Amino acid sequence: MDSSQTVAVGLKLTTLPTATPTPVSTATPRPTPKGSVFSNYEKGEGYYFEGKYQLAVNELNTAIRLNPNGGDAYFDRGMAYRKLGQYQRAIEDFDKAIQLDPGYANGFGIYTERGYAYVELGQYQRAIQDFDMPIRLDPGWQYGYSNRGRSYGSLGQYQRAIQDFDKVIQQNPGLGEERINTRNKAYTFRSLAYLALGQHTKACSLDSKYCRRLRPKNLAIFSPEKCPNF
């Protein structure tokens, strides 16, 4: 495998991080009366926070059956489906939530969540369209650029990927562990994009701290399996 092929593998986006990690709850939802939309919805949320995604889906199915016009239950069930790896079902639920609730149509999180699902299905252009929305709503949100940049890389649109990684770097000056880690990863993927374009000298001159990691024998560390969390 030549270096450009390896780089393409390295830039391929598989599992993206969520910008706002789901809180972990250790509480078990209390039994609630049957036949209440709110009670099923509440129980579904409780199971989701506990990581019991199929149980969450079961409760949210009931909530939707009792009230098929509520966008919140579709959104939450979509997130549970995504955690279960049922990405097409997740997308369908996110679509329904946007259709039912104008608040979701202008929302931030739902487009990011749907974008992640499109990424998992390899539908990178649709993912990019969804990642565009959070960037329009908040041009300072760094994860929007990193998500979109890696999607551009997966499509072989390396120049656009570089522009997005530039944004991530610019928005993370100074110290602080999270800022440093985010900036370092953006440097890494930007260098890979330059290598994919055949601009080896530029990759190392701009990101010299990472040159030793970009030698051909080490490029395998950038495979999706080795860096799933950016």
Image: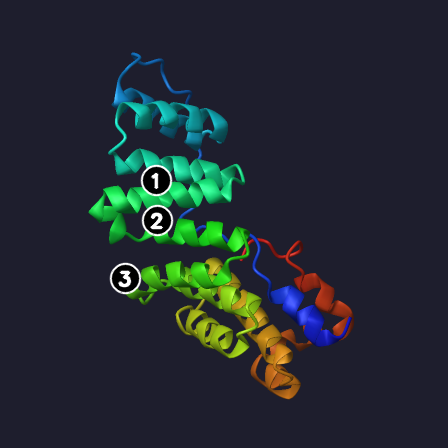
**Badge 2: few (under 14), some or many (20 or more) residues near its Cα, within 10 Å?**
many
Instruction: Give whichever of discs 3 and 1 has the lower sequence position.
Output: 1
In the structure shown, which secondary structural element does the residue marked by tag 1 occupy? helix
The 10 Å Cα crowd at callout 1, few under 14, some 14 to 19, many 20 or more, is many
Which label's residue is closer to the chain start, 2 or 1? 1
Q: Which type of secondary structure does the marked residue at label 3 adopt? A: helix
The kind of residue tagged 1 is Phe
- Does residue 185 appear to the left or right of 9 in the view shown? left
Q: At 50% from the left edge and 61% from the top edge, which residue is drawn?
A: 124
Q: Looking at the image, can residue 28 be seen?
A: yes
Q: Which residue is mark 3?
A: 137
Disc 2 from disc 1: Cα separation: 7 Å
Image vertical order of residue 215 relative to residue 68, above or below = below
**Are there few (<14), some (14-19), or many (20+) residues within 10 Å of tag 3?**
few
Residue at the spot x=41%, y=49% of the render? 113
Where does residue 139 sit, x and y in percent of width and height?
31, 67
Q: Amino acid at mark 3?
A: Leu
Contact check, label 2 and label 1, Cβ < 8 Å: yes
Percent position of residue 81, x then y: 47, 37
Residue highlighted by disc 2: 110
Residue 175, compared with residue 37, is above or below; it is below
Task: Judge whether 84 appears above or below 183 on screen.
Answer: above
Q: Residue furthest left?
A: 102
Check disc 1 and report the residue beneath it. 75
Q: Separation of disc 3 and disc 2 at Cα? A: 12 Å
Whether pointer 3 and pointer 2 mark residues with C-beta atoms closer than 8 Å, the reply is no
Name the image colouring: rainbow
Instruction: Give the spatial CA distance, label 3 vs label 1.
Output: 19 Å
Q: Nearer the viewer, residue 169 or 32?
A: 32
In which quadrant of the rendered view does residue 226 lie?
A: bottom right
Which sits in the foreground, 118 or 208? Answer: 118
